[in-house]
Image (cartoon, rainbow, N blue to C red):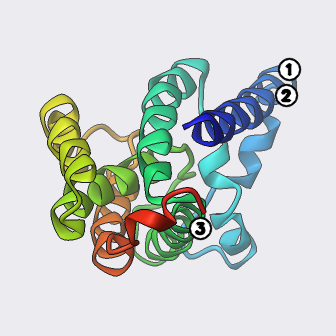
Amino acid sequence: MRNSIKWVVAIFSVLATIEIINILTGRSLNYFGLIPRSASHLPHIFSAPLLHGSLWHFLSNILTLCIFSFLVLQYGVKTYLKVTLAIIIATGLTVWLFARGGNHLGSSSVVYGYLGFLLLAGFISKHFSRLIISIFVGLAYGGLILGVLPQGNYISWESHLFGFIFGILSAKVWAHTPSYNMTQ
């Protein structure tokens, strides 16, 4: 558990530092968001989840991201890293290919990926504590699922939808991590 908390503190620290720099530079870092079908922005699939359009956008993502990161870390650091990387790359590529025009950014793509993973992984793993996590996430955060539906012009529901789908697929691949491997 202590290792998981260290990871969450590190994630929070990195994202908060980036947000502060982005605020101080007049949101100049948002250039590194993901613009669909722009070849020069394709590498930004890695930077877009680290950036936010406003302080409110950052605050609306950071707490849930930290909670979900902690819960995914219960599957082990290796699984956490594989799931996170798969969600970032697969969601980024599908947003780049299929999303509406505009600058897509924010960690909500990862939040929705973790949501999909956590909802399904406990049932697949058949491990009691992980099943409790899935039930908790479903009860406490199940309402987030509405975020995969088209909403306002400035909300990347595509990032939410694709993140959620790739989170579910990640659960199918990596939820079977043995319980003795949970700290790796």
Amino acid beneath label 2:
Ile
Q: Secondary structure at mark 2?
A: helix
- Marker disc for residue 21: 2
Q: Nearer the viewer, residue 103 or 57?
A: 57
**Tag 3: residue type?**
Lys
Other residues around mark 1 within 10 Å, as few (<14) / some (14–19) / many (≥20): few
Give residue 183's quadrant in the image.
Answer: bottom right
Of 113 and 42, which appears nearest the observer? 113
The tag earlier along the polypeptide, 3 or 1, is: 1
Q: Residue at x 76, y 37 (%)?
A: 14
Q: Residue at x 29, y 53 (%)?
A: 118
- Percent across and percent down for residue 9 are 68, 30
Give the crowd class for mark 3: few <14, some 14-19, many >=20 residues within 10 Å.
some
Name the quadrant of the N terminus. Answer: top right
The tag earlier along the polypeptide, 2 or 3, is 2
Side of 91 where 14 appears, left or right: right
Give above or below for 131 relative to 59: below
Mark sitting on residue 78: 3
Label 1's element? helix
Front-lying residue, 12 or 162: 12
Q: Disc 3 versus disc 1: distance between alpha carbons?
A: 34 Å
The answer to which quarter of the image holds residue 78 is: bottom right
